[in-house]
Amino acid sequence: MFHIMRWKRPTIATALSVLALSAALTSLGPTSQATAASKKTITAVMHSDLRVLDPGFTTAYITRDHGYMIYDTLLATDSNFKVQPQMADWKVSDDKLTYTFTLRDGLKWHDGAPVTAEDCVASLKRWGRNDNMGQKLMDFTASIEPIDAKSFALKLKEPYGLVLESIGKPSSYTPFMMPKRLAETPAGQQIKEHIGSGPFKFVQSEFQPGVKAAYEKNPDYVPRKEPPSWTAGGKVVKVDRVEWITMPDAQTAVNALQSGDIDFMENPSFDLLPVVKANKDIKIEILNKLGFQTLGRMNFLLPPFDNVKVRRAALLAMNQKDVLDALVGNPEYYKVCGAYFVCGTPLATEEGAGNLTKAGSMAEAKKALAESGYDGTPIVIMAPGDVVTLKAQPIVAAQLLREAGFKVDLQATDWQTVVTRRASQKPTKEGGWNMFFTNWVGADVMNPIANASIGGRGTKGGWFGWAESAKIEELKDKFARATSPDEQKKIAAEIQKEAYEQVIYVPLGQYLAPSAWRKSLTGVLDGPATPVFWNIDKSE
């Protein structure tokens, strides 16, 4: 009844969605409006507003999605988890120490310049500074050098079995290729131009954070001949434009989808799915079949979570079911899971999870906190209210931590503020933080090398939160050198046990996130880094 009543009262919400679209178009001016109206355009509401445009600066998926619009990758992963050529093909020397990559013909940057081996070497080096798999690959790499304008060589210090899987990884940080001058942007700085060689061009003049991002078909892009499969194969663009419209209110976006004001909605809220399912003009599908892992990350640099005893007390206070019930509600779309490397995969184990996957351990949490030396320092938790899949976690966690005896300062914000602020190592009084929550697609956390959150490098290349653990880094090296699945599984279980012991992060379960689009769209692709907008056509 509640859903039906909301569906019968769409006037205000629909008006708001129309206003949002009108504002985006009005900002273009009359000439641009007329031009946009004459083109085949997909309008989409993504899971988040786009603000950070540099896909080498943040692991945020909205920035990764932006990256796939305008950049391309050397290699790509298909639906059989097999690495395929994308911008380049490769050969491996008999001693397994030299990988030679050769760019395919016809690759141009959006400014018309040819893509060169020097550009790709610089791009790989930039990616290798930040990404977990990239960092590990660089640990094994002796050199990456151009051979000529279209080929380069990656030489290893010793054989390493994850070279292709690293360069072909589908999700954040994705190793996107960009011009050398941009790839050589100093560490810690964002790139100033947004020029790729991918299937779409970013329309910088129309970009309005909080309102709209626009992309035009790249007429110079030459797709591969193979059929599309995940991020591999031919990226054939069948529309003229794609516009991402910002609508943070879920009801407003659903009403806009139903009325046809927008074509695609990445993440309808779970409570509104029955309404969407009732509309015969809308299709609902889970594009990322591997799903998401949701998690909480503590800041190891600041009190009180610089104290492992306090982190353990916080872990004991958590339980996954409370979080998943609030986040998803419908067990059809979620799974309680204590595995750091995703349930249903070869490396899945419950080692170290304790009561996190049951009812929690609140009595133990209170006792552990009392014995930890905790001095009442407030826990600053960033709570984004504009992303459907990130609203519930901080609220539930704050409630559980307070029950355990923590003082909690729950700070309402938006997701792009979290994405920016989590990079700060300053004290909380100067804009720092103690805890935030995020989601990883399954492909990003399926093994210890890919999983950015599991690293122990601290401030020397570690992911936000800057967890430090020499033992985990040693075990990751062993995993990288492991030659059998059984050996890998054993080491992964050791890593997970240590990760729970140090509370590297708090895995809070897995969920599936359906997307919805009007049936006027065809050719929507699935995959671990969806949505992508090549291959989609739109009928009028």
Image: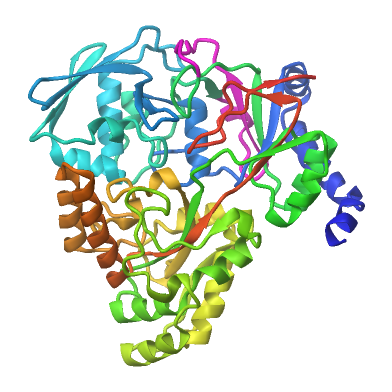
Query: Can residue 529 be seen at all in this image of the molecule?
Result: yes
The residue that appears at 40% across and 7% down in the rendered structure is 106
Based on the picture, tell me whether residue 215 belongs to the magenta stretch: yes
Residue 260: x and y in percent read 81, 34
Based on the picture, tell me whether residue 213 belongs to the magenta stretch: yes
Residue 309: x and y in percent read 30, 81
**116 left or right of 442?**
left
Q: How many marks?
A: 0
Query: Can residue 376 be seen at all in this image of the molecule?
Result: no
For residue 257, above or below residue 177:
below
Residue 299: x and y in percent read 36, 67
Give the quarter of the figure containing the C terminus. Answer: top right
- Determine which quarter of the picture holds residue 209: top right
The residue that appears at 45% across and 24% down in the rendered structure is 195
The span picked out in magenta is: 202-227
**Main structural element of the magenta stretch: helix, strand or loop?**
loop
Q: Residue furthest top?
A: 105
**455 left or right of 534?**
left
For residue 48, above or below residue 34:
below
Give the quarter of the figure containing the N terminus. Answer: bottom right
**4 left or right of 325?**
right
Residue 19: x and y in percent read 82, 42
For residue 295, above or below residue 110:
below
The residue that appears at 83% across and 36% down in the rendered structure is 280
Q: Residue furthest front?
A: 486
**295 left or right of 43?**
left
Residue 50 versus residue 25: which sits nearer the camera?
Answer: 50
